[in-house]
Image (spheres, helix red, strand yellow):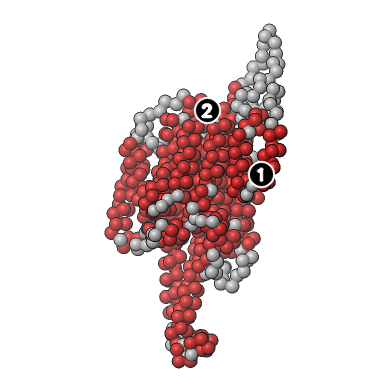
Amino acid sequence: MPYVPNGGGQRSPKWGNLFPFCRIYLQAGSFARLALLLCWFLASESLFDELDEDPAPMPPVATMTEAPAEQPSSIVGAAVPEAAIGVNPWMIAASVMLATFMEVLDTAIASVALPYIAGSLSASNDEATWVLTSYLVANAIVLPASNWLSLKFGRKRFLLTCVAIFTVSSFMCGAAPSLIFMLIARVVQGAGGGALQPLSQSILLESFPPARRGAAMAVFAFGVVVAPVLGPTLGGWLTDTYSWRYAFYINIPVGILAFYMINRFIKDPSYIRNAKVSKFDGRGFAALVLWIGCLQIVLDKGQEDDWFGAVWIRWAVLVLVASLVYFIHRSWTAKAPLVNLKILKDRNFAVGCGLIALFGVAIYSTITLLPLFYQELLGYTAFTAGIAVFPRGVGSIFGMPVIGFLSNKVDARYLMTFGFMVFGICCLYFGNVTLDISPMTLFWPVIITGFALSFVFVPITTQAYGTLRNEQMGNASGLFNLVRNVGGSIGISVAQTLLIRRSAFHQNDIINHVPQTGIWFQNSLKATQQALTPSFGKSNTLLPAQSALYQRLQQQALLWSFVDVFRWLSVLCFVCLAVVWLFKKVKPGRAPAGAH
């Protein structure tokens, strides 16, 4: 039976229990208030009686002697998807969005707190980077395997287990007494969080009718796009105000709330309950572990060890290529592979995977570059740099309802064209930065960038899944999110490498054009010596003046490397404009063929 708000026979909330709670709440501290709100929310289940899965039966509309009018079952299925019968679909969206937001936010928060983690656990900065690498490897391995696991154990049960594992391991990360303990906890946390994105996406797509999937994906995009932007700001504030451990403890109340809401509002559709699960593909999973593990480690450690200049990287790339080729071969030819790559025969889904990979390169590169620009060149702290890029999240928040409204009325290819065009223009604008800009110079471009991202992520998703059946959603979602994460990892690694390599190139180029014997250099050196004379004395100013000029040289070289990368990202966005039109047109709001 479809969801009916305020149906007959529903109990009214016990508002009388709220007044004693209010008196206690006003007398409590901030953390106690958060705990009281959570406890009251979990205890007052009667507040959600109107959203109960078994609402009161509707009054009969015909007697036993009257023949009911024939009505195609497809109409009912199109109006109210099976996964959302008896439940408000927006409560389903809120439930899975909480889990996705928590998982994506954790990666950005941990990256900000990394230096504090290294100091607290007596580890070097290089050793502390394994806190990120271990999480990303475990996360990426579980992504494509999530479909088989959800069919084997039930999607709802598997999702609840993942949320519980992620929440408990977050506490273990916050309470870690040593680096080894932290790495083990991060691996467990990554394994628990890996399935949250694809499961949430497939649940959303199945819970909303095709005409409202754009709005559903706008909610999902809030967790995927906004969380990485809010992460540095929230992580910097928690670390500076309390401790880096609270960057992990913050997941506990969110995880408890997500567990409760998922358990209450989500149920498995019939094709999952009645699924006949094939034998686990051990060979495919082993190949998956090898190539993803090698890829992530090479991307994270390649620049530190001069890429192919290191012998171990060459061996790792060899294992990566061999295992990837075997994985593709097995996933394409096996009868029951862990990941069914034959879904790439669908043109829209194949184009969507390629485009989301390029989108991952673009968005994660800019998310990495802008905070680095503020910190490395303008001297901002991690928290103030997070505040400077925070407007992108505001732009995305404003863009979500707009794209949710337009997605069912405008061809998605036009929306993506607009998004990539605006994003590319903003990257070109970022390519004109100087060392003299104020914090407000990039304020509006950053907001516009966030707004444009909404017009990219949501239409890509709706176009990629628009021609697939519900039974294909789980496998497609795991592969789609894996490709996006791999693209993001490649983008971050390439951006960091280009910054270092281009900085060295521009430094040599400036030295060649400004020789030490030239009049410009000599005039700058004498002016700097005169400025330093009161501090060092006239006879001791040569070395400090040369050091100051060399520091200025490094700043200019690094600035030009940022300019180069921003401009190349704009070129990437304009290339994506051509890829967008490889999509076949999907009529807004129309169900795919064979959809239930």
Label 2: state its secondary structure.
Answer: loop
Kindly indicate the quadrant of the structure image that contains residue 301.
bottom left
Q: Residue at x 48, y 92 (%)?
A: 538
Calculate the distance from the C-alpha at mark 1 to the C-alpha at mark 2. 40 Å
- Circle 1 crowding by C-alpha within 10 Å: few under 14, some 14–19, many from 20: some
- Image vertical order of residue 591 relative to residue 238, above or below: above
Observer-side mark, 1 or 2, equals 1
> In the image, residue 256 lies at what x, y percent?
54, 40
Is residue 513 visible in the rendered image? The answer is: no
Q: Which residue is drawn at 59% across and 43% down?
A: 35
Quarter of the image where the N terminus is located: top right
Q: Specify the label residue 269 is tagged with.
A: 2
Whichever of callouts 1 and 2 sits on the residue coming sooner in the sequence is 1
Q: Residue at x 47, y 72 (%)?
A: 557
- Image vertical order of residue 525 relative to residue 339, above or below: below
Q: In this view, does 430 lie to the left or right of 139?
A: right
Label 1: state its secondary structure.
Answer: helix
> In the image, residue 107 lies at what x, y percent?
48, 51
Is residue 297 visible in the rendered image? The answer is: yes
- Amino acid type, callout 2: Pro
Q: In this view, does 228 lie to the left or right of 123?
A: right
Q: Specify the label residue 389 is tagged with.
A: none
- Circle 2 crowding by C-alpha within 10 Å: few under 14, some 14–19, many from 20: many
- Amino acid type, callout 1: Tyr
Front-lying residue, 538 or 408: 538
Q: Mark 1 points at which residue?
A: 25
